[in-house]
């Protein structure tokens, strides 16, 4: 068990020496049919850091997030122009398999969505799908420990995932995502459906996980962004309701000394 | 780049697209299943068309006398569909006479008046009624409705086999279908509309009849059209109760064979292929197919228009 | 206020609230009546059928059953051996050995032999009969009348639907006719229908809901399925006649597999019937299954894809398991429609009278609804009673199926 964890940690360090930026977008535009939801986004995501995406509702935050693991393709009529680079490789190149992309770049959704199966199966299924050959019990325990859920569920692994509380369900979904060993985890307002205490748990967890994973989080809660993230990107809408990147900086910098007037207005609550 | 995960097989080509054999085989299988139903339609049109063409190629048969002839007597080469068509018309008319008003009344009651509890009790009963095989209705028409009609109107007036009895029982069969479709349409009317009408001081009846029903009118119309289509295609009730033998009459108390009833009687015997009888059922079938298809298409069109208004 | 002022017109309302309310109450009765008609119809239908399914029957025997008493035992209580002795002593040698050739006596049960005695020697005939209602309310009157009119005859209260009725094969003699042949035929046919239409329908539904995009081709497939669901069942019969019975005769008659003797082969088999009904219920199964699959929340699919699962892995592990109760319920409803179908099977040629149980997909066949149709078409009352009894068997079968569907729906009702 400890052996496994140590091995994963050492391998991670090897990777970390290679690249600082994991993801990068170049002139990214995202369309739904004729509507441009996101325009001309250029940003780099730093490895093993938490990057928050904030902005008024409807500015395309979730759309942008979903484009990082090609989940936006599941919406009919959506298409992109520009590039999303993952370790320098364009995710939208014709020979790239979206299924492989989602293996490396996992996702946690706004509403907890555990499978209507046992807690154990919730974790094990993704691993099995990817041909996991190791000790499944170990992986389940390790993932649940990482998601700070192990102590609460270790005796009820055979219970349905749906029997857990909302906050526990969301941590189960995070554990489930961790079990397939992604490099990046995308989180789409992961705490918005939860009570304040569960929200705190999730935020602590995000800080903890950023030691090992690159995390992108969309949130409509500015305090949350300030609390959990290392970097923050502020998005706003054009006149044609298309989202664009206003300011992207170190979180501290952005919240204390915003360079852009719009950002200042937004973080001081003057609009949004 | 390096593989991080422990216990996972090493991926040889990174993010590169993989050809997944199983995935593609399954997709092919699913696609064929999806397309299969197209072949059913092609089969229907092709087979009906082919044999019907043979029928019309027979000497003594032409399209005009087929459509306008008042006699269907194969043994003297008379193939006029009117006697079959009028009895289909009469049975369908009687069916709609029962099913349209009663179905409508039941729909309004269930959607606007009935409490949740009453509805939970009544709807299953209507569903049971809709689920009873039509041969059972045929039996009911022959052993109950016909004697009833004969008692009311006199034995000399009402024949043992008659279109009225078949039509009335068919109405009972179609009633639940119309009630259920019309109720769906009524329930789909937004509550805001009802509240607006109540706000102006309308009574419950006025709100139901003057606001909700007109707002759902296309859904109701679609229900009626589907009901007519169902009545025209209905077979076993007329085969049992409406009488054997084509009869050009508008008297609903006389026996007369419908289009569907004729097909059943002719094919029920030992039908030899390539005979004119064999070909003629395809001609009648083709006509039946086009009439019901047209009605169904119209009703779908009507419903589609209805949807555009409220969504 | 500037501009032209608005003149208030004379406004007068009539005090009509009482009339309006009265109308309202009147119409509620009309609406309620319309609904209750449905219940009345259902009750009348059931009463009518039950009323005809039992009652007093007067039998007259051509032969004298009392004369057949052997060793002081009346035929009703005789053993198989005794019955065989009665049979051999009253039938010509040729007739007896012919019976043995059709089905050896060693293989026949005691009840079969008893039926033969009744059919061949006693020759009961129904001379008069009453419906259940009359039999219960006018019992004395009937007994008196029978004693006067048919002093020799046997008066018996018969329940037409009984264990003998379920056990016996079809027969031209109503006294010993049963539905076994028809029930077995129905079960065989439905079995083939399910094997054919269920997998095909579910796969088509998966394709249309999970895989097919919004292209014009897929829209045509969808519209086509909706339209097929509205095609009259008799059209499917004509299609089945042309395709399965005629064009595919080598396949449906079994000669292709060498199962059937080519000289007597004929495409009017259980296989043809099952496939025809399969085509008929396919669109219904697809539509019901699509609804069940659509009811699975998208969040489950996204969870699967988000973990890097392929489409099929997600569909197989998460969409299908959650849709399967709905799919099964919808399929059962479609299958109960097929069980009651009569017209298409008459058209493909089921109506020939058959006295032997079906042995497989290539047997000739009859089904329960066909049997009801035949008996209903006979003018004699006793066949009507048989039809009523067969209808009760059919309704019981359908009720069982629907109960299973309701149970499934309640047992696995949505949890999210």
Image (tube, rainbow, N blue to C red):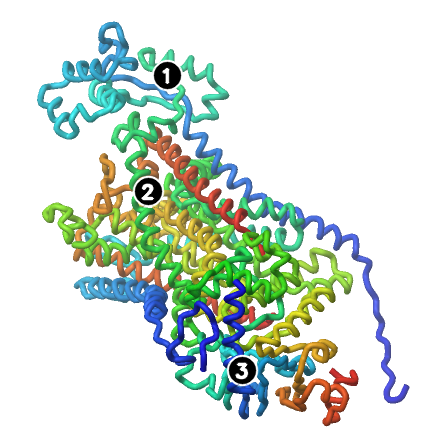
- Give the quadrant of the N terminus of chain C: bottom right
| Left or right placement of residue C318 versus residue C30 in this view | left
Residue to which mark 2 is pinned = C187
Q: Residue at x 66, y 87 (%)?
A: A237
Residue to which mark 1 is pinned = C155
* In the image, residue B26 above or below residue C169: below
Label of residue B30 in the image: none
* In the image, residue C16 above or below residue C385: below
The chain containing the residue under callout 1 comes to C
Q: Residues within 10 Å of mark 3 (few under 14, many from 20)?
A: some
| Left or right placement of residue C360 versus residue A239 in this view | left
Residue B216 seen from this side: no
Q: Residues within 10 Å of mark 1 (few under 14, many from 20)?
A: many
Instruction: Name, please, the residue furthest toward the right.
Output: C1
Q: In the figure, residue B64 lies in which quadrant?
A: bottom left
- Give the quadrant of the C terminus of chain C: bottom right
Q: Secondary structure at mark 1?
A: strand
Q: How many marks?
A: 3
**Number of the front mark, 3 or 1:** 3
Q: Residues within 10 Å of mark 2 (few under 14, many from 20)?
A: some
Between C380 and A66, the one lying in front of the other is A66
Q: Secondary structure at mark 2?
A: helix
Q: Secondary structure at mark 3?
A: helix
Residue to which mark 3 is pinned = A16
Q: Residue at x 53, y 61 (%)?
A: A140
Between B51 and C190, the one lying in front of the other is C190
- Whichever of callouts 2 and 1 sits on the residue coming sooner in the sequence is 1
Distance from Cα at disc 2 to Cα at disc 1 = 36 Å
| Left or right placement of residue A144 versus residue C188 in this view | right
Q: Residue C197 location, x and y as percent? A: 35, 55
**Number of the front mark, 2 or 1:** 2
The chain containing the residue under callout 2 comes to C
């Amino acid at each position: 068990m400890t052996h496994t964890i140590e091995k994963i940690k050492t391998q991670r360090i090897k990777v970390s020496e290679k690249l600082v930026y994991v993801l990068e977008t170049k002139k990214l535009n995202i369309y739904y049919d004729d509507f441009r939801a996101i325009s001309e986004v250029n940003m780099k995501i730093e490895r093993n850091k938490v990057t928050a995406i904030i902005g008024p509702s409807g500015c395309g935050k979730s759309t942008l997030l979903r484009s990082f693991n090609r989940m936006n393709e599941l919406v009919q009529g959506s298409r992109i122009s520009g590039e999303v680079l993952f370790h320098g490789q364009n995710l939208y190149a014709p020979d790239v398999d979206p299924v492989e992309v989602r293996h490396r770049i996992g996702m946690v959704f706004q509403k907890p969505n555990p499978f209507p199966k046992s807690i154990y199966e919730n974790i094990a299924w993704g691993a099995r799908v990817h041909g996991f050959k190791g000790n499944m019990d170990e992986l389940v325990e390790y993932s649940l420990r990482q998601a700070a859920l192990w102590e609460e569920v270790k005796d009820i692994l055979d219970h349905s995932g749906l029997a857990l509380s909302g906050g526990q369900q969301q941590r189960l979904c995070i554990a489930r995502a961790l079990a397939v060993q992604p490099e990046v985890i995308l989180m789409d307002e992961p705490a918005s459906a939860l009570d304040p205490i569960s929200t705190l748990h999730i935020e602590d967890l995000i800080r903890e996980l950023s030691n090992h994973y690159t995390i992108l989080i969309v949130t409509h809660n500015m305090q949350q962004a300030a609390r959990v993230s290392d970097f923050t990107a502020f998005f706003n809408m054009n006149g044609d309701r298309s989202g664009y990147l206003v300011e992207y900086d170190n979180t501290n910098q952005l919240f204390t000394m915003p360079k852009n007037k719009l950002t200042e207005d937004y973080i001081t609550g003057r609009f949004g | 780049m390096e593989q991080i995960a422990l216990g996972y097989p090493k991926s040889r080509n990174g993010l590169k697209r993989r050809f997944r054999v199983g995935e593609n085989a399954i997709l092919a299988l699913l696609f064929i299943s999806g397309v299969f139903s197209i072949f059913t339609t092609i089969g229907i049109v092709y087979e009906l068309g082919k044999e019907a063409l043979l029928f019309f190629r027979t000497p003594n048969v032409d399209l005009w006398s087929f459509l306008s002839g008042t006699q269907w007597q194969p043994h003297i080469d008379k193939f006029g569909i009117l006697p079959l068509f009028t009895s289909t018309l009469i049975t369908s008319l009687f069916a709609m006479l029962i099913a349209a008003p009663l179905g409508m009344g039941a729909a309004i009651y269930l959607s606007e008046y009935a409490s949740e509890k009453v509805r939970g009790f009544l709807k299953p009963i209507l569903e049971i009624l809709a689920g009873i095989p039509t041969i059972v209705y045929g039996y009911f028409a022959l052993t109950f409705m016909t004697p009833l009609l004969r008692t009311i109107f006199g034995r000399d007036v009402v024949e043992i086999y008659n279109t009225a009895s078949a039509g009335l029982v068919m109405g009972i069969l179609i009633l639940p279908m119309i009630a259920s479709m019309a109720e769906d349409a009524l329930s789909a009317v937004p509550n805001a509309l009802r509240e607006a009408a109540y706000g102006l001081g309308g009574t419950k009846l006025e709100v139901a009849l003057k606001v909700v029903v007109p707002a759902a009118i296309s859904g109701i119309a679609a229900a009626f059209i589907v009901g007519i289509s169902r009545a025209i295609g209905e077979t076993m009730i007329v085969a049992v109760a409406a009488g054997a033998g084509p009869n050009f009459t508008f008297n609903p108390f006389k026996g007369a064979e419908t289009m569907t009833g004729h097909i059943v009687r002719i094919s029920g015997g030992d039908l030899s292929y390539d005979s004119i009888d064999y070909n003629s059922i395809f001609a009648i079938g083709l006509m039946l197919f086009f009439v019901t298809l047209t009605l169904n298409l119209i009703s779908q069109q009507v419903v589609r228009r209805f949807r555009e208004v409220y969504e | 206020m500037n501009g032209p002022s608005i003149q208030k017109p004379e406004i007068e309302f009539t005090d009509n609230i009482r009339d309006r309310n009265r109308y309202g109450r009147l119409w509620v009765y009309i609406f309620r009546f319309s609904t209750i008609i449905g219940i009345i119809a259902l009750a009348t239908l059931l009463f009518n059928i039950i009323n005809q399914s039992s009652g007093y029957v007067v039998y007259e025997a051509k032969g004298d059953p009392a004369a057949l008493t052997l060793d002081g035992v009346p035929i009703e209580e005789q053993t198989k051996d005794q019955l065989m002795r009665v049979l051999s002593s009253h039938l010509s040698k040729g007739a007896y050995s012919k019976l043995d050739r059709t089905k050896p006596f060693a293989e026949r049960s005691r009840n079969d032999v008893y039926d033969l005695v009744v059919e061949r020697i006693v020759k009961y005939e129904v001379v008069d009969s009453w419906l259940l209602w009359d039999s219960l309310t006018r019992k004395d009157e009937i007994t008196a009348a029978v004693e006067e009119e048919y002093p020799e005859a046997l008066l018996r209260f018969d329940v037409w639907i009984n264990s003998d009725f379920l056990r016996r094969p079809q027969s031209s003699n109503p006294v010993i006719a049963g539905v076994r042949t028809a029930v077995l035929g129905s079960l065989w046919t439905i079995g083939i229908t399910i094997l054919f239409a269920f997998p095909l329908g579910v796969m088509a539904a998966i394709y249309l809901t999970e895989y097919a995009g919004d292209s014009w081709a897929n829209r045509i497939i969808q519209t086509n399925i909706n339209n097929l669901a509205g095609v009259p069942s008799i059209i499917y019969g004509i299609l089945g006649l042309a395709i399965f019975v005629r064009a595919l005769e080598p396949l449906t008659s079994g000669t292709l597999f060498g199962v059937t003797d080519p000289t007597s082969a004929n495409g009017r088999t259980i296989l043809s019937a099952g496939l025809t009904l399969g085509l008929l219920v396919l669109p219904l199964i697809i539509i019901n299954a699509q609804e069940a699959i659509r009811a699975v929340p998208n969040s489950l699919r996204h969870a699967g894809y988000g973990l890097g699962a392929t489409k099929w892995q997600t569909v197989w592990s998460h969409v299908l398991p959650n849709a399967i109760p709905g799919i099964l319920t919808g399929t059962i409803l479609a299958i109960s429609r097929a069980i009651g179908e009569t017209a298409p099977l008459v058209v493909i040629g089921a109506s020939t009278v058959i006295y032997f149980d079906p042995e497989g997909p290539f047997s000739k066949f009859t089904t329960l609804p066909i049997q009801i149709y035949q008996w209903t078409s006979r003018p004699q009352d006793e066949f009507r009673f048989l039809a009523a009894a067969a209808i009760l068997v059919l309704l019981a079968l359908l009720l069982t199926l629907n109960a299973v569907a309701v149970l499934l729906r309640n047992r696995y009702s949505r949890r999210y």
